[in-house]
Amino acid sequence: MRIVKSNRSQFKDHQITDETVFNNKRHFLKKLGLVSTGALLTTPSQAGLFDWLKDDEAQPAKPPAPLKQLSYQPVKQSQKDQLELTPQDKVTSYNNFYEFGTAKQDPSEHAHQLTVDPWQLTVSGMVETPITLNYDDLFSSFALEERVYRLRCVEAWSMVIPWVGFSLADLLKKAGVKSDAKYVAFETLYRPNEMRGQKSRFIGGSIPYPYTEGLRIDEAMHPLTLLAIGLYGKSLPNQNGAPVRLVVPWKYGFKSIKSITSIKLTNRQPKTTWNISAPDEYGFYANVNPNVDHPRWSQASERIITSGGLFDQQRVKTLPFNGYADQVAALYKGMDLSKYY
Amino acid sequence: MKIQTKVLLSKILIHFFALSPLLLNYFWSITDQNGADPVKAIIHFTGIGALNLLLITLLISPCAKFLKQGWLMQLRRLIGLYSFFYALCHVINFWLFELNFQISLFLQELIKRPYIWLGMAAFTILLLLAVTSINYLRRKLGQNWQRLHYWIYPASLLIWIHFYWSRKADLTEPFIYLALIIILLACRPKKLKNWLLFK
């Protein structure tokens, strides 16, 4: 089955902007000597004043691994045109992946230290046949397809990303889900020597590691739910969750767990990282919902991360289930979504 | 060097170091070279810049006393005004670029979100202090001027709470700032007492 789900909200223009070089500015700053100057000056792109305390290692100990060109069933151009894709360099340089630091550019600067090959993804728990996928299996076991999804972050920004991957359902069916399994628990790699945020709580934002997430079984089996192994036609850059990550487009981004090593079928609702950290702010379900605000900010609208500067900003209304209500609202029939946020 | 020359040169430096990063950041944000989200970048830069400048403002009088360099006091108003100016840019950025100029959304957020109205409360204080920094008003206010300007202390704490509350995780930086604020306030126990007792 090939699924191309785009958002119902339509954007008029389609353009993918050429990649711009973000680094120029940093070099310029460094030349000026502004980066490490005292209290008055902070480095841009949200780098903090005290980042120099955290920069413990010199830059590239090893170069980032080259990305694999993937072969997959592409999305039809006409469907791609419905949504304006977020430029690739923004998708790969603006990430929440606290294992590499809490600033948005930290993952793109530090994730190259992670070794993704060899890799093992295990499917275990309440299944007929436990499965282990090695690095190459991730790319060869299932038919790969491209899907253009919107990603809505709980921080009220969004992107449009062309993922490459396969349905989580394909993998779960292969393992054979036992009838009493009710939930799926996911876990990110725990490897502090390559993930600086796990080594130091000052870098990793003091959230518990390894990062865990969970879905109800019907959510996990839903055809929209994707295991992504690539984006923009190539294997995932490390900062985007290489080699394999979850993408659940109707839920806030933090549900889409990165660099997964374990998928476990269980009959109990799994503990999830952000829910443990701040239960009143981040629920288990985390469905995108414009009517239920985050305690500290509104979720009614969002800013689209796209090309263009300060004066080209687009703020749009957030749609229920991020625009995928037609396909997924039935999963939550009769549930009070302000209680199960 | 004459004191007047020292003050003049210092002021030129202050203008340069306050304005150049601000202009550069606006340039980068307008031309989409300020990270993937130029709006967040400029909002955070001006916000933290305002706090940094406020802390420097608070540092002036202890420094002048400790180093016995009275002329430093002549720089304080300028740095304080730049702190206000950064805060003004911060508020405008939020309204203009984050909320796309929507007044209703701005007011809604203002009322509903404690961290926003705390920030606005702090901004209101800074606004009052900036306006009354004009010599004419300063003379006019007499004794009350000092009483009013003690409000920089609660403002610094309000700004800190605003900063702390805006964070999702990673609270190291806010707590380093808190330590700095506490140290700076502890440098002036007498004035703090005066403020608390409405003297």
Image (spheres, coloured by chain):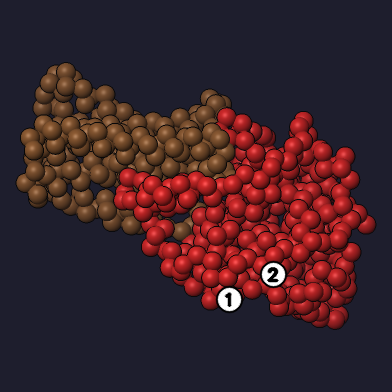
Chain colours: A red, B brown
Percent position of residue A298, x then y: 57, 40
Distance of label 2 from label 1 (alpha carbons): 12 Å
- The front one of A189 and A274 is A189
Judged from the image, the secondary structure of the residue bearing numbered disc 1 is loop
Quadrant assignment, res B134: top left
Tell me the kind of residue under disc 1.
Answer: Arg
Q: Which residue is mark 2?
A: A260
Picture residue at 11% right of the left edge, 24% below the top? B142
Residue A191: mark in rendering = 1
B127, above or below A100, in the image = above
Work out whether mark 2 precedes mark 1 in sequence or the reverse, and give the earlier one.
1
In this view of the protein, which residue sits in the foreground, B124 or B2?
A: B2
Residue A12 image offset from top left, x and y in percent: 77, 30
Residue A255 at what x, y percent from top left?
67, 58
At horizontal 37% and vertical 36% (from top left) the residue drawn is: B20
Residue at 25% across / 29% down in the picture? B129
Please name the residue shown 51% across and 61% down the image: A101
- Marks 1 and 2: in contact by CB < 8 Å? no
